[in-house]
Image (tube, rainbow, N blue to C red):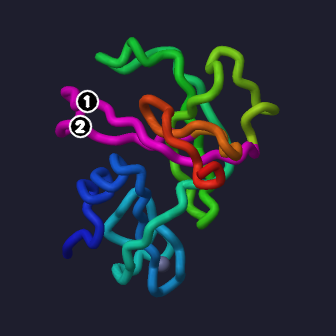
Amino acid sequence: MEYKLTFKSYNDALKKNRLLGLKCKACGAITIPPKMVCRQCTSLDMNIIELSGKGEIVTFTTVNVAAEGRQGEVPYTIVMVKLDEGPWLMGNLIDIDPATATMEELIGRKVKMGNKIFPGDKYSAGESARPLFSFDKTCELVGYPPYSEKTEECK
Ligand SMILES: [Zn+2]
């Protein structure tokens, strides 16, 4: 068996702000991050598709204790986002103060994906990208860093 979409390809796309997933030909479910089989029906028959990266926050957690080597990142907020295409994706959320984020403020908010590239550490095989979400507001600045790109609506 071989991976139709390898984690490396998924990660390389993520670094370019593109979110790839696998759409099952048997049941239509979308699987991300990539796995060898459909998350819904375990079929191997899937096509690579590109997702919008847009969705809404389902739940979140704020991290105050950093993993080794990441002390400079805390506190930060991790969100679980239900993408417009259906699957859920976990990522970091910017645009907020993690210390004061509330359920009322975050649950159900529309967000869109950018990405953040983390240097390799002893737990990973080199540099990897992690989804980074921000609130989906027309004309807000996106990109990371330096938040200098305009959204499509503003061009
Ligand atoms: Zn399936």
Q: Dot 1 corresponds to which residue?
A: 119
Mark before the other along the chain sequence, 2 or 1: 1
Q: Could one spot residue 57 in this view of the protein?
A: no
x and y percent of residue 52 in the render? 54, 61
x and y percent of residue 9 in the render? 26, 59
Crowd class of label 2 (few under 14; some 14 to 19; many from 20; radius 10 Å): some
Number of numbered discs on residues? 2
**Three-letter amino acid code at the position of disc 2:** Glu
x and y percent of residue 61 in the render? 60, 30
Residue occupying the far bottom of the picture: 26
x and y percent of residue 41 in the render? 48, 77
Q: Which residues are magenta?
A: 108-133
**Three-letter amino acid code at the position of disc 1:** Pro
Crowd class of label 1 (few under 14; some 14 to 19; many from 20; radius 10 Å): few
SS under mark 1: loop
Q: Could one spot residue 56 in this view of the protein?
A: yes
Image disc number at residue 137: none
User: Residue shown at 38%/13% (left/top)?
Assistant: 71
User: Residue shown at 61%/65% (left/top)?
Assistant: 86
- Evaluate if marks 2 and 1 touch, with contact meaning CB atoms under 8 Å apart: yes
In terms of depth relative to the viewer, which is nearer, 71 or 135?
135
Location of residue 23 with respect to 64 vertically, above or below: below
Location of residue 74 with respect to 57 vertically, above or below: above
Look at the image and say whether residue 116 sits in the magenta stretch: yes
* 82 relative to 53 in the view: left or right: right
Image disc number at residue 127: 2
